[in-house]
Image (cartoon, rainbow, N blue to C red):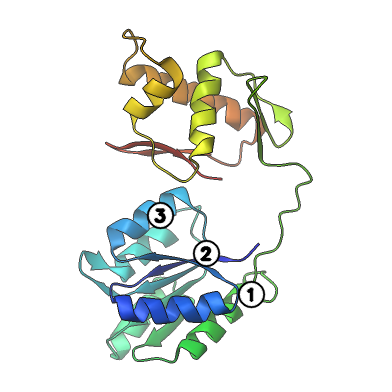
Amino acid sequence: MSARLLLLEDDPAIARTVAYALERDGLAVTHSLLVHDARQQLQCTRFDLLVLDVGLPDGSGLDLLRDLRGAAQTSAVPVLMLSAQGEEIDRVLGLELGADDYLTKPFSPRELAARVKALLRRAGHGNGHASPAPAAVPLFHDDEPGQRISLRGQALPLTRREYRLLSHLLRGAGRIHSREALLAAAWGDDSESTDRTVDTHIKTLRAKLREVDPGREYISTHRGMGYCVDI
């Protein structure tokens, strides 16, 4: 499985050049134009490395870096910063906030790719590709005919509604599902059900997932939008 990279860059031409150089080396690149978009991607996907531009139309990559280093799930993810500003203060601030490397524009795409691969090796990804997962069983297994879902080989004690909710979330893993869509998937035309019903069932689902895998949260909340599963 290729290492997954998030590229935050608002210049489409630079982004295309960087993505091409990285993908040519077998790396999987997700591109975001805005800080807001990058935050949404990070909530639903686990990346092996981040390439963040400093100056964005809706904020600064340095602010995002500060938040990432303060969160347990992203505190150790390697980060390479990009900046059009060559002043020493910008480089120093980025490194003090926890950046692992820094490149000033203009730069060579080949140099960027080499630095990315070096950071991945330092993070334990061998030759720059993510190591295969050691698990002998799939993370989730959805037995649709039997309406049963297993996590890490262990069957989850789900009610009929919980099964429908989790199955729907898994089929669209990485996407944000509105409460309305989840209501339709799990309750159909049941007029007695409300958004609060979905929230309650999501809470019990989380508890059952934690019983099997207490070290990870699989269902994330997106305020005002809904829920998504990160696998």
Between discs 1 and 2, the one toward the N terminus: 2
Q: Earlier in the sequence, mark 2 or mark 3?
A: 3
Amino acid type for the residue under numbered disc 3: Gln
Residues under numbered marks 2 and 3 in contact, where contact means CB atoms less than 8 Å apart: no
Q: Residue furthest top?
A: 192
Dot 2: what SS? Answer: loop
The crowding category of the residue bearing disc 1, from other C-alpha atoms within 10 Å (few below 14, some 14 to 19, many at least 20), is: many
Residue on which disc 1 sits? 128
Quarter of the image where one finds residue 159: top right
Residue behind mark 3: 41
- What kind of element bears circle 3? helix
Circles 1 and 3: CB atoms closer than 8 Å: no
**Residue 133 position (above or below residue 174):** below
Residue 115 or residue 31, whichever sits in front: 31
Relative image position of residue 185 (x, y in whole percent) = 43, 23
Q: Nearer the viewer, mark 2 or mark 3?
A: 3
Q: Is residue 122 above or below residue 136?
A: below
Q: Secondary structure at mark 1?
A: loop
Seen at 79% across and 45% down, the residue is 136
| Mark-to-mark CA distance, 1 and 3 | 21 Å
Give the amino acid at mark 2. Val
Q: Position of residue 189 (x, y in %)?
A: 36, 12
Q: Quadrant of residue 99?
A: bottom left
Nearer mark to the viewer, of 1 and 2 = 1
Identify the residue at horizontal 52%, vertical 20% (top origin).
Answer: 162
Vertical side of 180 occupied by 130: above or below: below
* 10 versus 176 height, above or below: below
Q: Residue at x 30, y 37 (%)?
A: 225
